């Protein structure tokens, strides 16, 4: 490239290269990089021998004759608003005015007051439309510094950034939302508020983990649902903690109000088919909602323990299994991902603080775990129990962890429901378009303490004085609608009155049913119980001919696949010899035979874990690789022509918590699939102890959720020290009660073969299976 770049480059090329350099300095050729580095230095610092030099570039040149310095400053101005606008956005409803951002001041941008009336243009904004500088700044202020802060310029892919930019910058010229849409938002917001206030008065002091202050969550969820109906979405799979859960059950899943109110009554007795039950703000629910367009969408809210963010992996696994049901061949096509939408609702302190969040985000783009994008909603009430953001995180935003996967973040003021609705709809559209995760950060507040019996002003006196003086989101929005002339005061009040009448009526019907002893009137739906566990033997044997046929098939490799010489001789050769001799079948071979036998019967298998394709001890080799092309070949998936039942085996990321949660969630959905998770060593399973304690061992008793997940835990005291020896058999035995799970220590490959087949053939009763597996004995 010639050194005289500026002399021969046209303005558009220069501008385009400048934008590329601003976003990523290493993305342009070295000559361009050097030019722009010197160029920015030159316009930012006046030469010392010219004290009268105007660092802002003097007068702006007229359109058509803009000098390079002026063009660069205009491009930089637009770029800075796109990059930094979210730091100036008025997203905190407790602040009386938006924050300042010095980097977006006129002087920092390289302009003076007298420049505001000058006419300018840039291809970098609105296709070069001519406008005065003050109009450009005004439009950028309204676009990027309003009630939504769009954080997206960290994203590496230009096509993704441009999609967001175009959507955001087009909004300023769009037709305002219709009265119908405003009425929807008012209804969702008012119902959320009225529900909490009703409970507050009727059931004084009872824990409910109120949504008050964050009622805009209902606007976001219902807005997503309405849009989902026209987006080919069939299922929404949700996970959330206790904050706002009852409101979500009532005003999003439409759980019968009588049932919810009954759970608050003094004589409430859980109507359980089995087990011990759980508190009302942990319970899940399944519903079918019909959208305004007439589409039916199934909504599944997963049950959740008090352990924050623990359910995230479980929800992703359930979503993946539902997607797999739509795509039996696991083609990993977006067409089969889109119809099942995972939504995870987080708190601000937990999203920043819990390590499982990062683990689940890291799952989002991996072949074995991707779900086509998750919509994350942070109910950001700016406090964690008593802990302020200053003490809760080291990052500016609670959502900064999401940048690790290039997720866009839309920060939005919770007191501005129409902005919440816009951001929620855009988040869903983004997810459906790119099959990637997106974060909606609803900045709000918590009107009460951590629970309704807690006094927050002990530790946060100033904030809670402000909160108590602050009008509710529904009141703020209702008054704005009246002031704009969209609604009368009577219309706004009518929305509240009608819902309050419904609540009063539901309570009256509940009390009447209780007096008459009619428990069926308020018991709600009850799941079908599993039959009692039985020790009756399950037939798991196979005839010799079938086993030999399977064994020979999985010992062969097509001639075009050139496998490692050692594997060809020692691994595959040993398998052929064992089949021919009728003895010498080791653990990995027994496992492969079990898989193959299940596939012939129409069952599937899924196995994941760290290095499980090969096996930590080089025992499994479920996937063989061509030595030249690294083409993969899975012997058990090639038993016969047109085989449909297969093994889906995935090396996992280096995580126990998220991955075991994922596999547990997967196992809840697909009953015809043997779902297995293998620990690298049994000792490391305690990295997922929350999943083991709160889900695998106890979910059937608490929530009537039945799983047949298999945990493979290498176990054995073989001189490898305290971190690589014990799967803690005693801990799992201690967790056993009331036939909740099976713990086994098989001592022969034959036992291993039969227990795997037993696990799926016991179709009427599903129990988790915890298996101690050997290490040095794997090849015996």
Image (tube, rainbow, N blue to C red):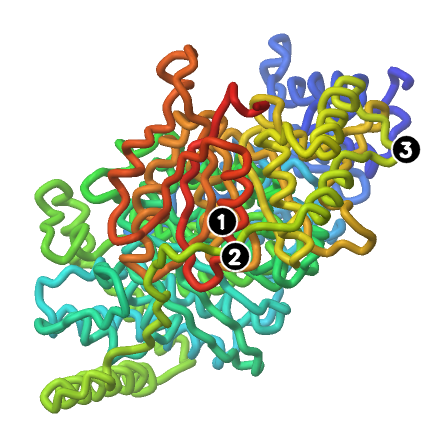
Q: Give the mark nearer the N terminus: 1 vs 3.
A: 1
What numbered label is drawn on residue 4?
A: none
Q: Could you tell me residue 442's position as x and y percent?
A: 39, 53
When the figure is inspected, residue 67 is found, relative to residue 143, above or below; the finding is above
Residue at 49% in and 46% down: 663
Q: Position of residue 675 (x, y in %)?
A: 53, 48
Q: Where is mark 3, residue-wise? A: 560
297 or 229, which is in the foreground?
Answer: 297
**Which residue bears the numbered disc 1?**
439
**Which residue occupies 62% across, 50% down?**
542
**Label 1, label 3: how far apart the Cα atoms are:** 46 Å
Image quarter of residue 621: top right
Determine the secondary structure under disc 1. Answer: strand
- Per the image, the residue denoted by label 2 is 761
Q: Is mark 2 on a helix, strand or loop?
A: helix
Where's the N terminus, which quadrant? Answer: top right
Corner quadrant of residue 354? top left
Q: Can residue 111 be seen in this view?
A: yes
Distance from the alpha carbon under mark 1 to that under mark 2: 42 Å
Label 3's element? loop
Label 2 environment density (alpha carbons within 10 Å; few <14, some 14–19, many ≥20) = some
Other-residue count near label 1 (Cα within 10 Å), few / some / many at <14 / 14–19 / ≥20: many
Observer-side mark, 1 or 3, equals 3
Q: Sequence order check: which comes first, mark 2 or mark 3?
A: 3
On-image quarter of the C terminus: top right
């Amino acid at each position: 490239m010639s050194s005289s770049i500026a002399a021969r480059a046209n303005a558009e090329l220069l501008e385009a290269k400048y934008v590329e350099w601003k976003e990523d300095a290493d993305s342009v050729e070295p000559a361009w990089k050097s030019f722009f580095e010197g160029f920015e230095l030159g316009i930012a610092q006046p030469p010392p021998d010219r004290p009268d030099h105007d660092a802002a570039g003097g007068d702006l040149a007229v359109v058509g004759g803009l000098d390079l310095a002026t063009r660069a400053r205009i491009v930089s101005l637009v770029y800075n608003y796109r990059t930094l606008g979210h730091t100036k956005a008025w997203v905190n409803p407790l602040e009386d005015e938006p924050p300042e951002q010095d980097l977006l001041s006129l002087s920092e941008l390289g302009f003076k007051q007298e420049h505001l009336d000058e006419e300018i243009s840039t291809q970098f904004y609105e296709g070069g439309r001519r406008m005065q500088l003050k109009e450009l700044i005004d439009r950028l202020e309204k676009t990027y510094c309003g009630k939504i802060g769009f954080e997206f310029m960290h994203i590496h892919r230009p096509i993704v950034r441009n999609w967001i930019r175009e959507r955001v910058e087009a909004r300023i010229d769009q037709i305002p939302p219709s009265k119908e849409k405003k009425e929807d938002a008012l209804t969702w917001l008012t119902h959320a508020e009225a529900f909490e206030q009703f409970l507050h008065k009727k059931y004084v002091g009872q824990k409910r983990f109120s949504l008050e202050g964050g009622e805009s969550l209902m606007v976001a969820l219902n807005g997503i649902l309405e849009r989902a109906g026209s987006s080919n979405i069939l299922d929404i799979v949700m996970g959330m903690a206790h904050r706002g859960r009852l409101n979500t059950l009532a005003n999003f899943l439409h759980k019968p109000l009588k049932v919810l109110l009954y759970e608050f009554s003094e004589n409430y007795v859980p109507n359980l088919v089995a087990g011990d039950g759980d508190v009302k703000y942990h319970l899940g629910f399944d519903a079918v909602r019909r959208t305004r367009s007439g589409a039916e969408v199934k909504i599944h809210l997963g049950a959740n323990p008090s352990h924050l963010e623990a359910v995230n992996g479980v929800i992703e696994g359930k979503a993946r299994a539902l997607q797999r049901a739509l795509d039996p061949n696991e083609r990993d096509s977006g067409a089969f991902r889109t119809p099942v939408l995972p939504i995870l609702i987080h708190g601000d302190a937990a999203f920043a603080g819990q390590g499982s969040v990062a683990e689940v985000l890291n799952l989002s783009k991996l072949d074995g775990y991707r779900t086509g994008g998750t919509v994350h909603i942070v109910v950001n009430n700016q406090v964690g129990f008593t802990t302020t953001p200053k003490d809760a995180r080291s990052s500016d935003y609670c959502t900064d962890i999401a940048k690790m996967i290039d997720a866009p973040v839309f920060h939005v003021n919770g007191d501005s429901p129409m902005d919440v609705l816009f951001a929620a709809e855009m988040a869903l559209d983004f997810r459906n378009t790119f099959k990637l995760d997106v974060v909606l950060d609803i900045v709000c507040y918590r009107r009460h303490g951590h629970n309704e019996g807690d006094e927050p002003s002990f530790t946060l006196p100033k904030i809670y004085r402000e909160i108590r003086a602050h009008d509710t989101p529904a009141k703020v929005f209702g008054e704005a609608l009246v002031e704009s002339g969209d609604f009368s005061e009577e219309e706004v009040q009518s929305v509240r009155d009608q819902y309050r009448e419904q609540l009063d009526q539901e309570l009256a019907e509940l009390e009447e049913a209780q007096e008459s002893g009619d428990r069926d009137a308020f018991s709600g739906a009850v799941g079908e119980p599993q039959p009692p566990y039985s020790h009756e033997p399950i037939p798991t044997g196979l005839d010799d001919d079938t086993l030999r046929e399977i064994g020979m098939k999985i010992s062969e490799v097509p001639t075009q696949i050139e496998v490692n010489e050692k594997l060809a001789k020692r691994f595959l050769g040993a398998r052929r010899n064992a089949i021919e001799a009728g003895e010498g079948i080791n653990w990995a071979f027994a496992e492969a035979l079990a898989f193959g036998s299940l596939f012939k019967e129409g069952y599937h298998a899924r196995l994941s874990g760290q290095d499980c394709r090969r096996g930590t001890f080089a025992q499994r080799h479920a996937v063989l690789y061509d030595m030249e092309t690294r083409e993969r070949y899975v012997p058990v998936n090639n038993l016969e022509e047109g085989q449909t039942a297969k093994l889906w085996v995935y090396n996992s990321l280096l995580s126990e918590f998220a991955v075991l949660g994922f596999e547990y969630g997967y196992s809840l959905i697909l009953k015809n699939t043997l779902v297995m998770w293998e620990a690298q060593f049994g000792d490391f399973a305690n990295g997922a102890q929350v999943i083991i304690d709160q889900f695998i061992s106890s979910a059937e008793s608490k929530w009537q959720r039945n799983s047949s997940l298999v945990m493979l835990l290498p176990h054995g005291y073989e001189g490898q020290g305290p971190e690589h020896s014990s799967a803690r058999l005693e801990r799992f035995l201690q967790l056993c009660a009331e036939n909740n799970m099976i713990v086994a220590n098989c001592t022969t490959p034959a036992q291993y073969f039969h227990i795997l087949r037993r696990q799926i053939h016991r179709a009427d009763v599903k129990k988790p299976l915890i298996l101690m597996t050997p290490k040095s004995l794997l090849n015996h």
